[in-house]
């Protein structure tokens, strides 16, 4: 009986924790730039604006819909739109219904989707397959979005998303990148000459920076990445905080279809080419493995996505050769030294016979 009571207590405690986390995330994401915007102007074939047009924006992955109506100037705007693939329909009595097929909405980006309606019955439909213009005519901020497909199609030596930031103009690498765990990965980069610790990294709009070195505190499994946005200049009011670049990663979410995968990426010294001067390779083992799964809890309403990743890293630099001083050299006698002339720092001349006078030897160094 006590065992059952403990189980029930743990169950309800877990439920309370999940509800608290859900409410916290809901409150937090309402205040951050983890969404995009869709806006436009509706006109007729002559170019005159049309007020009162019913605009419907539908997420093709989740089935969620957003509705709006054009104002007196024929304009509409969906200011907060989750990342995803969408279609947009425009309908008004006396005009043919127009449908703009699949187009992406990215975080911190504005999509302008204008439409010119033709006179006709509303039961008639005209489908537009051309994508909206990619040039941002709404804001002056400069940046680029890297999609989840690109993240998982391009080869990455350490499976850390920030490696792809180096593909952007104005980005330079300050240190060699190496695999690790979260902020222990060496993934420092500079944007437009600003210090690496001045970059502002986010996950779903929430700050994700190890302020000591400027690395990402959390480096998610790449299969859990929907996209990430790099902004390098003229940030909007939703960004800021730091003088460097803004890098906002958007995590994947579930859809109306079940999807999942199991993966492993590895490197092993037994598969590496041998160094010409070595008889064996230094031990170097890197295993990155995990899984993820997502799908609907309630179709068109509630979804889940779960991802886990493990890394096992064994690294060795291999043997190193160090030259230690002989007993004679410790007493200042470098007459047999093959390293060349020993220079007197006071005169800039060679010590006669490469012999350093005993009174010129540092006592602390000799003790050490």
Image (spheres, helix red, strand yellow):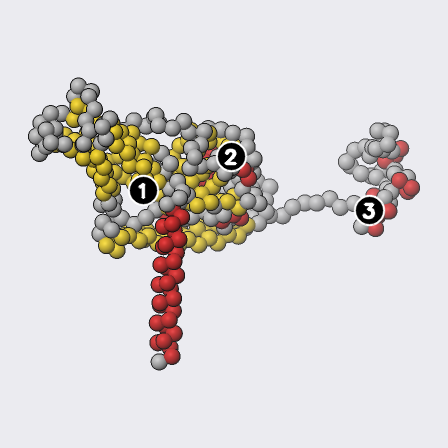
Label 2 sits on residue:
244
Report, in whole angstroms, how far the alpha carbon at label 3 lies from the one at label 1.
65 Å
Give the mark nearer the N terminus: 2 vs 1: 1
222 in relation to 91, above or below: below
- Viewer-closest of 362 and 173: 173
Residue 274 place in picture, x, y as percent: 53, 43
Q: Which mark is residue 14?
A: none
Q: Is residue 347 left or right of residue 7?
A: right
Report, in whole angstroms, how far the alpha carbon at label 3 lies from the one at label 2.
44 Å
Q: Which mark is residue 82?
A: 1
Q: Is residue 7 left or right of residue 68?
A: right
**Mark 3, secondary structure of its residue:** helix
Say if residue 29 shows up in the picture: yes
Residue located farthest toward the front when viewing the structure as drawn: 72
Q: Is the residue marked by circle 1 packed among few (<14), some (14-19), or many (20+) residues within 10 Å?
A: some
Residue 146 place in picture, x, y as percent: 38, 36
Quarter of the N terminus within the rendering:
bottom left
- Circle 3 or circle 2, nearest the eye: 2
Say if residue 176 shows up in the picture: no
Q: Which mark is residue 365?
A: 3
- Viewer-closest of 334 and 305: 305
Q: Residue at x 18, y 35 (%)?
A: 54
Q: Residue at x 85, y 44 (%)?
A: 362
Q: Is the residue marked by circle 2 packed among few (<14), some (14-19), or many (20+) residues within 10 Å?
A: many
Residue 236 place in picture, x, y as percent: 42, 33
Residue 44 place in picture, x, y as percent: 17, 23
Q: Is the residue marked by circle 3 packed among few (<14), some (14-19), or many (20+) residues within 10 Å?
A: few
Report, in whole angstroms, how far the alpha carbon at label 2 lies from the one at label 1.
26 Å
């Amino acid at each position: 009986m006590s065992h059952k009571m403990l189980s029930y207590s743990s169950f309800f405690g877990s439920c309370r924790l999940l509800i608290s986390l859900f409410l916290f995330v809901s409150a937090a994401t309402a205040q951050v730039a983890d969404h995009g915007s869709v806006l436009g102007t509706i006109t007729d074939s002559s170019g005159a604006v049309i007020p009162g047009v019913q605009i419907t924006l539908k997420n093709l992955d989740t089935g969620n819909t957003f509705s709006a109506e054009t104002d007196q100037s024929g304009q509409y705007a969906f200011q907060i739109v989750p990342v995803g693939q969408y279609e947009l329909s425009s309908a008004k009595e006396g005009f043919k219904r127009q449908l703009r097929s699949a187009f992406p909405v990215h975080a911190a980006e504005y999509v302008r989707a204008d439409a010119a309606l033709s006179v006709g019955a509303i039961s008639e439909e005209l489908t537009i397959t051309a994508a909206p213009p990619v040039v941002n005519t709404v804001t002056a901020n400069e940046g680029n979005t890297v999609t989840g497909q690109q993240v998982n199609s391009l080869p990455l030596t350490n499976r850390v998303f920030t490696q792809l930031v180096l593909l952007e103009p104005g980005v330079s690498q300050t240190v060699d990148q190496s695999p690790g765990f979260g902020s222990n990965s060496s993934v420092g980069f500079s944007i437009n000459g600003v210090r690496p610790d001045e970059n502002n990294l986010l996950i779903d709009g929430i700050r994700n920076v190890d302020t000591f070195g400027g690395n990402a505190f959390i480096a998610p499994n790449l299969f859990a990445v929907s996209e990430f946005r790099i902004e390098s200049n003229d940030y909007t009011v939703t960004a800021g905080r730091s003088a460097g670049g803004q890098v906002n990663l958007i995590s994947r979410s579930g859809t109306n279809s079940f999807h999942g995968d199991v993966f492993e990426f590895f490197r092993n010294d037994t598969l590496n080419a041998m160094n010409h001067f070595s008889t064996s390779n230094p031990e170097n083992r890197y295993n990155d493995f995990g899984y993820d799964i997502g799908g609907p809890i309630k179709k068109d309403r509630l979804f889940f996505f779960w991802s886990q990743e493990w890394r096992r890293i064994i690294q060795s630099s291999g043997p190193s050769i160090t030259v230690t001083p002989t007993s004679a050299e410790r007493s200042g006698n470098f007459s047999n030294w093959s390293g060349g002339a020993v220079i007197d720092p006071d005169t800039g001349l060679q010590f006669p016979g490469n012999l350093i006078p005993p009174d010129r030897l540092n006592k602390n160094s000799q003790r050490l």
